[in-house]
Image (spheres, helix red, strand yellow):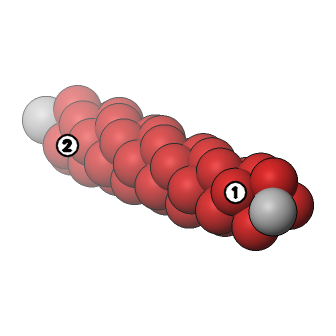
């Protein structure tokens, strides 16, 4: 009976880690986009 409980905990942990990973990638992508746009803008001035 303890096996399904462990599996549920593992599944929740996996989803939580995936959600955090997705958020980090999103933030990194936004920062990278801002840096590239800022770099392009400063060259054109």
Tell me residue 15's x, y (percent). Answer: 56, 60
Could you tell me which residue is drawn at 36 percent across and 42 percent down?
A: 27
Please state, as top left, top right, bottom left or bottom right, where the N terminus lies in the image: bottom right
- Answer yes or no: do the residues labelled 1 and 2 have beta carbons within 8 Å? no
Snapshot quadrant of residue 43: top left
Return the residue nearer the eye: 35 or 28.
28
In the shown orientation, is residue 34 left or right of residue 9? left
Relative to 27, is 24 on the left or the right?
A: right
* Foreground pick, 19 / 44: 19
Quickly name the residue at label 1.
5
Which mark, by number, is residue 28?
A: none
Q: Residue furthest right?
A: 3
Secondary structure of the residue carrying numbered label 1: helix
Instruction: Give me the C-alpha separation between circle 1 and circle 2.
Output: 54 Å
- Decide which of 25, 33 is in the foreground and name it: 25
Q: Residue at x 69, y 57 (%)?
A: 5
> How packed is label 2: few (under 14 Cα within 10 Å), some, or many (20 or more)?
few
**Which one is earlier in the sequence, the residue at label 1 or at label 2?**
1
* Label 2 SS: helix
> The C terminus is located in which quarter?
top left
- Answer yes or no: is residue 7 visible: no
Asked if one can make out residue 24 in the rendered structure from this viewpoint, the answer is yes
Instruction: Relative to 32, say whether 26 is above or below.
Output: below
* Residue beneath disc 2: 41
| As drawn, 8 above or below 34 | below
Up-down: is 17 above or below 39?
A: below
């Amino acid at each position: 009976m303890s096996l399904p409980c462990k599996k549920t905990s593992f599944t929740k942990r996996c989803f939580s880690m995936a959600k955090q990973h997705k958020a980090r990638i999103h933030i990194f992508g936004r920062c990278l986009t801002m840096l590239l746009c800022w770099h392009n803008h400063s060259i054109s001035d």
